[in-house]
Amino acid sequence: MNAYISVWKLRFLSGLQYRAAALAGLATQLFFGLIFIMVYVAFYQHSTAEPQMTLSQLATYIWLQQIFLSFVMLWFRDNEIFQLITSGNIAYELCRPCGIYSFWYAKLLAQRLSSAILRCLPILLIAFLLPIPYNLSLPPSASSFIPFVLTLLIGLALNVAISMFIYISVFWTMSPVGSTLVIAVTGEFLSGMIIPIPLMSAWLQHFTYVLPFRWTADFPFRVYSGQIPPAEALQGMIIQLLWLAVLIIVGRWCIKRALRQVVVQGG
Amino acid sequence: MIKLHGINKSFKVARRTAGIGQAVKALFAREHTIVEALHNISFDISPGEIVGYIGPNGAGKSTTIKVMSGILVPDSGSCRILGYTPWQDRTEYVRNIGVVFGQRTQLWWDVPVIDSFGLLRDIYNIPPVVYRENLALLTESLALGDILQTPVRQLSLGQRMRCEIAASLLHNPKILFLDEPTIGLDASSKIAVRQFIKTINKERGVTVILTTHDMNDIEALADRILMIGKGTLLYDGSLAHLRSRFGSNRIITLDYREHAKPIEIEGTNCLSWSPERAVYSVDIDTVPVASIIAKLSEQIELLDIGIETTPMEELILELYKEHQI
């Protein structure tokens, strides 16, 4: 266990080194948050139907996406692991007395956390201070805030488990570009990062509900705004945990197969 | 302690000849050849040995090391090391071994070396006392004092390699696999590394298996040589035995006061001659060195004599030739 905490710590600390990246990310995320909300403001003004979400709920949803971007983004990746696989340095990882899956999991988790910590507070603060309707609003009650934190954290764990498949796929493809693109684009769409899931058409919503992706982002964000009441959140949490278990078990199985046929060429 | 029996491993390699036509063809039907990297490799190594594992490029040295360290799974054959089968009991087994791949790095690129060591301490669960002791020993004998605080990316190759070796020894491994550990090192670092390998072998009884292309490494360290070529084990024996097979030849270089004509000595072969210097090759089993010198000094005024054994490099070359690899 010690090893996983240690790699987590090391990765976390080295992640904190990248201040310029955090600053640039901060600016980008503020920009995108504002643009998205502006687009929706325009849509809402001219819409004839009654939308599933109020404008303030929507602004909150989008700000949460931006604040916890590094928790929910699937394209967020660790190039070191890709290099490890393609260059053959994985030889060293295999000489360590610990499971590769858990080791990488800890590393990826740390990376997302360190990246989020550097940028979430400033965006949070700015988003709160913006004028209506662009602002991030408080959750309706404390009873929806606590489930939000829990579901967000499980969502993070779930997201790392999903992203693990990108890394595992590189054992076969030898290039991260394809799988990152495919998994990231579909995953992000299906987790409501492009169009919030409540605004999708009904059949598409049903489709997203049976996949794991929405449980990483859409679900916790709607728990925050109270659209999903705490009781229902609890049920959702169980589904989240089930998904997490399934993905980890399948991921472990895949990595075991990948390692059995690993070829470390040259030297 | 280490027992390999009938290990086979082959790789599938895609190949095509140059040119656009061939490239397009390869889109539809790709040609593969099966490269037999290891063919029926068997050997035993007992505790405390230092074994030099040699062979030309692409012979299968690294593949064997990778099989023995649990990274690759062979196609067939059995391998028992310390009672484990490396690729089956990987996590349990690797606690007991240290591995250095000269061409790869195990240190974290962006952080100081000492942080990587700290991570290894936690990964291997090294007790604090042992860790401190080992770190002190390694720092002293590999001269790491000044570089432990430096980020790895700013180290030179030689400095990094010394750190890599240290990193593989922090957890007191019983077996150390070194895959080209002296690659790119300068003379003084090489000597320091060799000295260190000898020390841990003597004092801690660490079994060392080392691959290298630098025959001086082999000469300085290995008691026993395993030679592999085209995936097959070709020679397993001591260095002295190898020497005696090829080694009764000596090269004698003579410097003398000017002398007009070459001197013929029975049983020798004059390789080069000038009025002040001559080089002879001689088989000392048939003509003793003493008699040659005696004969020479009757005729000329000798200034300097050098006697060399056939260099290790040439011995190995002979051996490669003999096996046509």
Image: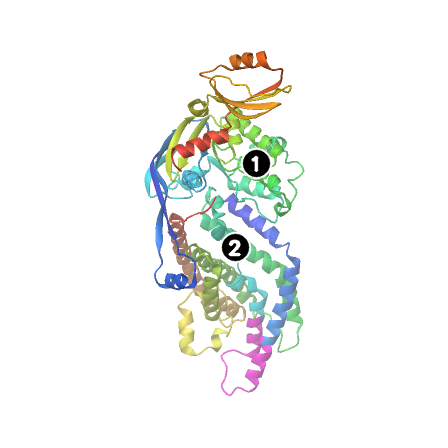
Residue B52 location (% of width, % of height): 46, 31
Residue A30 location (% of width, % of height): 63, 70
Q: Tag 2's secondary structure?
A: helix
Q: Tag 1's secondary structure?
A: helix
Left or right of residue A176: residue B75: left
Q: How is the image coloured?
A: rainbow
- Circle 2: is it few (<14), some (14-19), or many (20+) Cα within 10 Å? many
Letter of the chain that mark 2 sits on in the rendering: A
- Above or below, B143 relative to B257: below
Q: Closer to the camera, B246 or B253?
A: B253
Q: How many numbered badges does the structure rendering display?
A: 2
The amino acid at mark 2 is Leu
* Whether residue B52 can be seen here: no
Magenta-span inclusion, residue A40: yes
The residue to which callout 1 is attached is: B166
Name which residue lies at 42% across and 71% down: A208
Q: Quadrant of the C terminus of chain B?
A: top left
Magenta-span inclusion, residue B303: no
Region rendered in magenta: A36-62
The amino acid at mark 1 is Ala
Q: Closer to the camera, A248 or A173?
A: A173
Q: Closer to the camera, B311 or B44?
A: B311
Q: Are marks 1 and 2 in contact (CB under 8 Å)?
A: no
Letter of the chain that mark 1 sits on in the rendering: B
Name which residue lies at 58% across and 81% down: A41
Question: Label for residue A108?
Answer: 2
Q: Quadrant of the N terminus of chain B?
A: top left
Residue B51 location (% of width, % of height): 45, 30
- Tell me where residue B17 sits by quadrant: bottom left
